[in-house]
Image: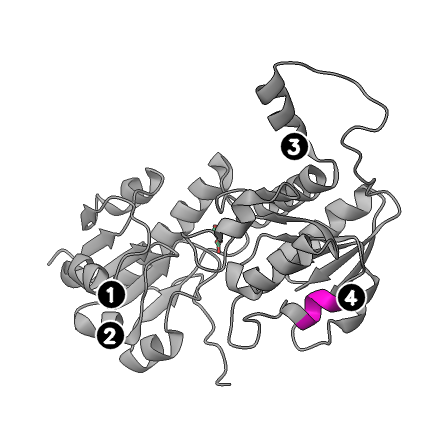
Amino acid sequence: MRYTVVLTGEYPPIAREILAPAFDVIQHPTEQARTEEEIITILSEADAAITLLGDPLTRNVLAANPNLRMVANYAVGYNNVDVEAARELGITVTNTPGVLTDATADLTMALMLAITRRVVEGDDEIRTTGRCEWEPMKLLGISLQGKRLGIIGMGRIGSAVAERARAFGMEVVGSRRGESIDDVLATSDVISVHAPLTRETHHIIDAAALSRMKPGAYIVNTSRGPLIDENALCDALDSGHLRGAALDVYEFEPEVNPRLLRMRNVVIVPHIGSATDEARTAMARIAAMDVFRFLNGQPPLNPVVPQPRA
Ligand code: DGY
């Protein structure tokens, strides 16, 4: 009997190349914010699936198809998966750690530089006026050299950002899971957020946390949007308490808070932290290899460790 593997989006071709010789592969177009009903329909024929980070793999979805035995989530983050339900239902879940660390750390530095050096405002000015005019006081930002970077979440990606930031002459302080972030918030010129989204980290940067940040500081988020209370962030930017924010992820993705769209002291990009040829291909390879191994009776290499109960 040939197993059926469902690809819920259009992944790099390597995924199909690995899977198609051995299994029946059904590929669906990439779609944002599917409903539970939509994803249940898509997964109805699957023995295993490669899933998008926006696919809601809730208990209902996981329980709907008794043949579904494995889900390879095409992301390092797996907050879209009810891991407890998967464990109870005996469904194996994997993710794609490691291979997107450099790409995401690079984008974090790109955003940090873009917001502190007002790159997007400059680009916008030239496109609008068609001119490049040098002026002594125009578009002044800050230098990263000698500034303090506070990293919330010193895991793989946070540590890779720390390494890059030190090369720019920054002093780095970090907080790990379970540690207080108060000192990091109060003393940093730039905060960069790199924690996974869990019950504990949801709104870890809320109005109170923002008020503890240094006046004139910047914040960068390339992890998950709901770690920051977006309305509170807009208030802090509007009031001038924060000087700028650079975001790759949003609280209600794929929706983006309209207040952010109007702000010039915000750089916004569409969740492209891992968007390099190299990282996305490597993610597809390890997701597909884990499906291949699993359906051939071997343990997958990147099983997700369940979150402990709150
Ligand atoms: C992830 O892997 O969790 C990123 O958000 C997308 O690559």
Residue under label 1, please give it.
36
Residue beneath the point at 37% across and 68% down: 81
Q: Of callouts 4 and 1, which one flags the residue occurring earlier in the amino acid sequence?
A: 1
Residue 60 marker: 2
The one nearer the camera, 222 or 162, is 222
Dot 4 or dot 2, earlier in sequence: 2
Tag 2 and tag 1, C-beta contact below 8 Å? yes
**Crowdedness of circle 1 by 10 Å Cα count: few (<14), some, many (20+)?**
some
Which amino acid is tagged 2? Asn
Q: Which amino acid is tagged 4?
A: Val
Q: CA distance from mark 2 to mark 3?
A: 45 Å
Residue 280 seen in this snapshot: yes
Q: For label 4, count other residues whose C-alpha is less than 10 Å away and answer few (under 14), some (14-19) or many (20+).
A: many
Q: Which image quadrant is residue 139 in?
A: top right
Circle nearer the N terminus (2, 3): 2
Outermost residue to the front:
239
Q: CA distance from mark 2 to mark 1?
A: 8 Å
Residue at 65% x, 39% y is 110
Residue 184's tag is 4
Disc 1 marks a residue whose amino acid type is Glu
Residue pushed farthest bottom? Answer: 310
Residue depicted at x 70% and y 65%: 210
Q: For the stretch drawn in magenta, what is the main secondary structure?
A: helix
**What span is colored magenta in the figure?**
208-212
